[in-house]
Amino acid sequence: MSPKRVRVSTFQRNVEARAFYEVNGFRAVGDTGGRNEENEPDVQYVWDGPGR
């Protein structure tokens, strides 16, 4: 069974991960502006399942 929604985050500088998510249908929905444990800007992605 596939989940209805998956949320992930990756650092903005992680170009390979961002490309992977975007090619596989994830969409960027926000960022923390570096307000995280690593103090590193990130991008938050959402995938809404197949065919959505």
Image (cartoon, helix red, strand yellow):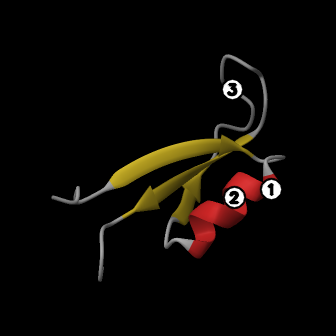
Question: Label 3 amino acid?
Answer: Arg
Q: Secondary structure at mark 1?
A: helix
Q: Which residue is mark 1?
A: 15
> Is 6 left, or right, of 23 in this rendering?
left
For the view shown, which residue lies furthest in the front direction?
A: 1
The spot of residue 29 in percent (x, y) is 53, 58
The spot of residue 23 in percent (x, y) is 60, 74
> Does 7 appear above or below 5?
above
Q: Secondary structure at mark 2?
A: helix
The residue positioned 74% from the left and 20% from the top of the image is: 38
**For the residues marked 2 and 1, what is the alpha-carbon distance in whole angstroms?**
5 Å
Question: Label 1 amino acid?
Answer: Val
For the view shown, which residue lies furthest in the top direction?
A: 37
Q: Secondary structure at mark 3?
A: loop
> Does 31 appear above or below 39?
below
Quadrant occupied by the C terminus: bottom left
Front-most of 42 and 25?
25
> Is 36 left, or right, of 6 in this rendering?
right
